[in-house]
Amino acid sequence: MAGTKKTPNKQQSSADSLEYRLTVQGPMAGTSLSGLEERFTAELGATQAKSIVLDITGVGRVDSRGIALCIGVFKECSGAGRSFRIEASGDVFRMFKILKLNRIMDIREGVVA
């Protein structure tokens, strides 16, 4: 399906080391996750930013593998001394709250662009 390819969209603030944003569009489920973890690892390894934002406001569905990916990125950032937050919207945001993931990581309700 067109428009569902999972490629991180990186955006940095004007100060190179302040914030690094990874953006995902479409579902984070099943085979659509193929290669996304490796891309995130590569992107995180290439930046010196101390704050990482995973923007999934454009994601309409997340399965258990997608949740595991989010937790993995959180752990990688925490282990490297970086702050990490997820911006999600709609049902995905509500699901993260129901699972109480907001108790272990910063999850904020974002607006779909």
Image (cartoon, rainbow, N blue to C red):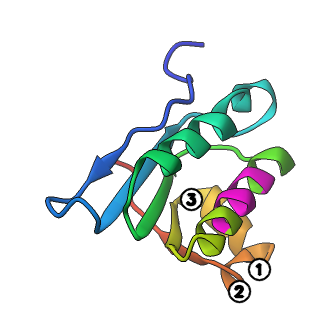
CB of mark 3 within 8 Å of CB of mark 2?
no
| Residue at the (45%, 48%) spot, across then down | 22
Q: Residue reaching furthest right?
A: 64
Q: Position of residue 89 (x, y in %)?
A: 52, 59
Camera-side residue of 24 and 40: 40
CB of mark 1 within 8 Å of CB of mark 2?
yes
Tell me if residue 50 is in the magenta stretch. Answer: no
Task: Please name the amino acid that badge 2 sits on.
Answer: Arg
CB of mark 1 within 8 Å of CB of mark 3?
no
**Disc 2 designates what residue?**
103
Task: Please name the amino acid that badge 3 sits on.
Answer: Gly
State which tag comes first along the sequence, 3 or 2: 3
Q: Residue reaching furthest top?
A: 1
Q: Quadrant of residue 9?
A: top left
The rendered magenta stretch, by its main secondary structure, is classed as helix
Q: Position of residue 99 (x, y in %)?
A: 81, 73
- The 10 Å Cα crowd at callout 3, few under 14, some 14 to 19, many 20 or more, is some
33 left or right, relative to 68: left
State which tag comes first along the sequence, 1 or 3: 3
Disc 1 element: loop
| Residue at the (85%, 50%) spot, across then down | 64
